[in-house]
Amino acid sequence: MKRATIIRTLWHWHRRIGLLACALIIVLSITGILANHSSQLGWDRSPISVQWILNSYGFNAPETYQGLAVDEHLWVIGGTQLFRDDVSVATCSSDWHSVSWLDPMVIASCASKVELFSTDGDRIEIFSALPEGRLIKSGRIKNDGRLLLQFTQNQYLLDVDSFEVTAVSGYEMILPQWQSVPAPMTQSLQSQFRVQDLTWERFILDVHAGRWFGGWGWLLMDLGAIFMLTLALSGVVMYVLRRTR
């Protein structure tokens, strides 16, 4: 095959492959730059709040919320988020299941921790050194300033002043009187839906690697890599053939 024919053939495919690879190159370039600077931008610590992105991962805002009235304010739990009225005050890696008022503190718990707050919504302390693996629920004991922690089989008393834990049995827990959350507040809470572990950095890396595009995403990115390798090789070959005329 003549050199001119080879060059024309390579140039023909070089242009077409370049057009196909263009979109992938733009995506890879932008996400690569953003991922490289995610820590400086704080995206490695910022949970995503864009609903369509959350939905693409299968995360949907809770349909119902439960509230506990404390000093004319409503402490609300919904999934992994804890709110005071419609202001988010804490998140957990699992669903919040308990909120109690031990005057002057509000105490909320999920499977992995217990958090203490002032009635103004300021976090006072986090207690995560649980005596067992998974906390099922917590609640106050009548006429007692300690908190009862309920695990699968065992109970423990937690002194919220000293954080001393004592194994007990046979205690009755006073559960909160949950109140319904007004519809306007529910809509506000749903608009603030977050997932603690789903940060902007993870989303950027998932797009960069093709994972976000589903089961065929990795194949799409591999194809893009092959296109770019083809562009590089065909460009070098055409350059060499023209220089050696």
Image (cartoon, rainbow, N blue to C red):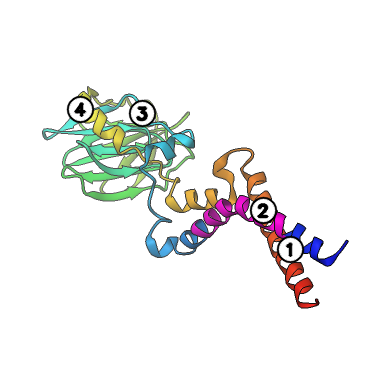
State if disc 2 and disc 4 touch (CB < 8 Å).
no
Q: Is residue 7 depicted above or below 126 in this figure? A: below
Alpha carbons under labels 1 and 3: distance apart: 53 Å
Identify the residue position indicated by label 4 in the image: 184
Sequence order check, earlier mark of 2 and 1: 2
**Residue kind at label 1, given as amino acid type:** Ser
Identify the residue position indicated by label 3 in the image: 62
Q: Is residue 132 depicted above or below 42 in this figure? A: above
Q: Is residue 162 visible?
A: no
Quadrant of the drawing holding the C terminus:
bottom right
Q: Residues within 10 Å of mark 1 (few under 14, many from 20)?
A: some
Identify the residue position indicated by label 1 in the image: 234
Nearer to us of marks 4 and 1 is 1
Instruction: Say which residue appears at 59% left-offset and 51% top-offset.
Output: 209
Q: Is residue 45 depicted above or below 78 in this figure? A: below
Instruction: Say which residue appears at 44% left-offset and 60% top-offset.
Output: 38
Instruction: Say which residue appears at 37% left-offset and 41% top-offset.
Output: 50
State if disc 2 and disc 3 touch (CB < 8 Å).
no
Sequence order check, earlier mark of 4 and 3: 3
Helix, strand or loop at mark 4: helix
Sequence order check, earlier mark of 4 and 1: 4
Viewer-side residue, 119 vs 234 = 234
Helix, strand or loop at mark 2: helix
Sequence order check, earlier mark of 4 and 2: 2
Identify the residue position indicated by label 2 in the image: 17
**Residue kind at label 4, given as amino acid type:** Pro
Quadrant of the drawing holding the N terminus:
bottom right
Which portion, as a residue range, is magenta?
A: 11-30
User: In which image quadrant can residue 10 be found?
Assistant: bottom right
Q: Is residue 170 a member of the stretch shown in magenta?
A: no
